[in-house]
Image (tube, rainbow, N blue to C red):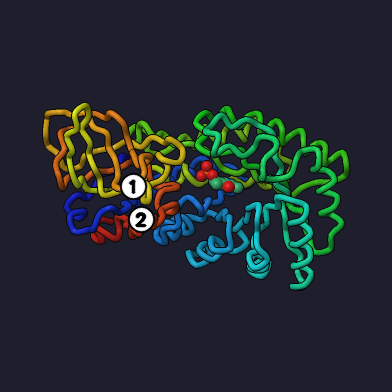
Amino acid sequence: MSTEFPIGAFQHVATPFYYYDTALLRATLAEIKRATADDAAFHVHYAVKANVNPTLLRLIAEAGFGADCVSGGEVKAAMAAGFPADQIVFAGVGKSDWEIRLGIEAGIHSFNVESMPELAVINDLALRAGRRARVALRINPNVDAHTHANITTGLNENKFGLAMEDMEAAAKEAGSLPGIELVGLHFHIGSQIEDVETFVPLCERINDLQQRLEAAGISLPSLNVGGGLGIDYRNPDEHPVPDFAGYFEVFRRHLHLRPGQSLHFELGRSVVGQCGSLVSRVLYVKEGHQKKFLILDAGFTDLVRPALYQAHHEIENLTSRESRKETYDVVGPICESSDVFAHGLTLPAGHRGDLVALRSAGAYGEVMASSYNCRPLPKGYTTEDLCPDAE
Ligand SMILES: *Cc1c(COP(=O)(O)O)cnc(C)c1O
């Protein structure tokens, strides 16, 4: 099920642009459904911040997934794409009043509350709207996600969530507020987690916390374990679909759900990461004294992950038929020395005008684009957009 690029159709599209392989997305969604089919308690919410392309959102909503949002804008985008409001969860350390009001009025599934002052404001705004807001308390479980420091969120103490030692008092407070209905606990330890065993200590921590709450007479209708399942950036064609079966099995085995309790997941990268590529053209092949450079028309304004997290994306020359190989630094046009996609990469000899794909760019790619240097934002096209007769 690896991506095949409609190179003929690409010739008519201005570069750089994002290409989304909807056949691969459909296969990915089908695998998630297959891997959770036996667990009526499991609910998967798509983490909208990974990619908000309207066609992708629609396909994910049609497949029956909920949404995980981190801003009012995302709640609006999710509802516009067809996600039912009562399957939307809303996290974020700094929710504005209008965003909270929007969630209350829409009747979202729950707010993931990250601080006590936020809980008080939600209570207040819910009472003013004549409603009760459903909330889950986001707890910082102090579990190491073994991933890049910039995308670790579960270690003590950071801006996300409540400390474990404050959980019981927070749960009691939530239970006493008339505008609040406490529906569960929420956790999210980080992103691009490649070893699913990393989630075992999270499950054990949750079991322990749940027992503590029950001992205090508090039971919870739901648990939410966040997202974070990684993708194989080095081998997108060998592993186009992540190991969802192995991932869900960890929770099935290690997390002790109570009868009737629902378990919520918030998956972003693992859903859309592999279906997207950033497609760019070679502007110049520059022969330096020690190095050769492939200078692309895409830069970190289009795909910031390499500059921001030293992230690796496989790079493929879609045009060159040269058997001769060359070693290049693959760089963008932005006036910053961090605008480099790869150092010393061996590729078929390249030429001005070649189309190049930066693979595994479906998550945290297009959504993080900026217009620095007054550059236009890249557009995103799906298989349906470019090849309307394909399916
Ligand atoms: C970003 C985020 C996710 C999704 O993370 P992925 O690594 O893309 O699966 C889930 N939950 C919360 C609260 C997040 O902030």
Instruction: Return the residue at label 2.
Output: 373
Q: Secondary structure at mark 1?
A: loop
Q: Dividing the picture into quarters, in which one does residue 102 lie?
A: bottom right
Asked if residue 290 lies left or right of residue 373, the reply is: left
Which quadrant: the N terminus? top left
Tell me if mark 2 has few (under 14), some (14-19) or many (20+) residues whose alpha carbon lies within 10 angstroms of its own.
few
Three-letter code for the amino acid on which mark 1 is drawn: Cys
Residue at horizontal 31 percent and vertical 42 percent from the top: 358
Asked if residue 67 lies left or right of residue 320, the reply is: right
Q: Position of residue 282 (x, y in %)?
A: 20, 45
Relative to 30, residue 63 above or below = below
Q: Position of residue 215 (x, y in %)?
A: 87, 38
Residue 261 makes an appearance in the image: no
The answer to whether the beta carbon of the residue marked 2 is less than 8 Å from any atom of ligand 1 is no
Observer-nearest of 199 and 356: 356
Q: Position of residue 357 (x, y in %)?
A: 27, 43
Three-letter code for the amino acid on which mark 2 is drawn: Asn
Earlier along the polypeptide chain: callout 2 or callout 1?
A: 1
Q: Dividing the picture into quarters, in which one does residue 232 lie?
A: top left
Q: Position of residue 148 (x, y in %)?
A: 52, 33
Instruction: Return the residue at label 1.
Output: 335
- Dots 2 and 1: beta carbons under 8 Å? yes
Residue at horizontal 81 percent and vertical 42 percent from the top: 166
Q: Secondary structure at mark 2?
A: helix
